[in-house]
Image (cartoon, rainbow, N blue to C red):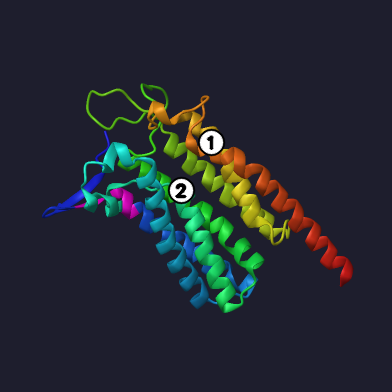
Amino acid sequence: MIDPVILHIGKMEIRWYGVMIALGVLAAYWLQVWRGKRYGVKADHISDITFFALVAGIIGARLLYVIRYWDEYFADGDLLEIIAVWHGGLVFQGGFIAGFIAVIAYAKWKKLDIGGIGDLMAPALALGHAFGRIGCLMNKCCYGFQPYEGLCAIHYEKGAAGYFPVQGVESICNLLICAGLLLLERFGIAKRRLFIIYMMAYTLLRFVDEFLRGDYPQDQIHAGLTPAQVICLWLLPVLGLAYGTITWYNRKEKKND
């Protein structure tokens, strides 16, 4: 049985969700600092990038969550609940888009190499997301289908049916994506394209693991697909085109050197 709250301080709750998000941000930051010299990026820039991406990401992730689940959780008029991210409720796609825009804006402002910044951030994003998904598991958000009493079944209440630990599966897969990206980096493969590879890998992962989710209202599922899967189907060809375009451009640059 999992209690999502670590401790109570008066009326305030400290939840595992927030702790895991914080640990994920720290792990992602230090992974970038450790590899920063490879890309000629100073620790100060990494700190700024992490800060702006985090703030924009939280705003974007919460905004998309509120939009998606307005009728279920927010239509009663409790406006303070909209900003209560410590209760859980962040949508990765919204956070990713907002954070991506913030990083691009910062890189343009500081005249940094966007391709190199993307390669630097890609493994760190996967690592931080792995921590975040453990937070989801402990907070009972983004949960798997129920009932499930097989290997590693999760029980949030005593005597209640178990849930499939889809958040844990996604966490492990994110760690594997991180390791794979670091290997590509180590051998100099797919330079300036690691970020695209990360996005493609996670998009595929998300499409598959959505079939194991149990937290979507039935009225949000169309043709057997969740809203996130529909986004994935639109995103994959765009990412494939982006990867091919960047590969062609890099080869063209080498020929001209």
Going by the picture, which residue comes out furthest to the right? Answer: 255
Residue under the point 30% across and 52% down? 85
Q: Nearer the viewer, residue 64 or 209?
A: 64
Q: Amino acid at mark 1?
A: Gln
Residue at the spot of label 1: 229
Question: Which element type, helix, strand or loop, lies under badge 2?
Answer: helix
Residue 79 on the magenta span: no
Q: Nearer the viewer, residue 76 or 55?
A: 76
Q: How many marks?
A: 2
Residue 217 to residue 46: above or below: above
Q: Position of residue 112 (x, y in %)?
A: 61, 74
Q: Amino acid at mark 2?
A: Phe
Left or right: where 147 falls relative to 250: left
Residue at the spot of label 2: 92
For the record, the magenta segment spans 13-19
Q: Spatial distance from mark 1 to mark 2, Cα to Cα?
A: 13 Å
Q: Position of residue 228 (x, y in %)?
A: 50, 39
Q: Position of residue 3 (x, y in %)?
A: 24, 40
Question: Which element type, helix, strand or loop, lies under badge 1?
Answer: helix
Q: Position of residue 241 (x, y in %)?
A: 72, 49
Determine whether label 1 and label 2 are within 8 Å by CB.
Answer: no
Residue under the point 38% across and 45% down? 67
* Label drawn at residue 157: none
- Mark 1 is surrounded, within 10 Å at the Cα level, by few (under 14), some (14 to 19) or many (20 or more) other residues, namely many
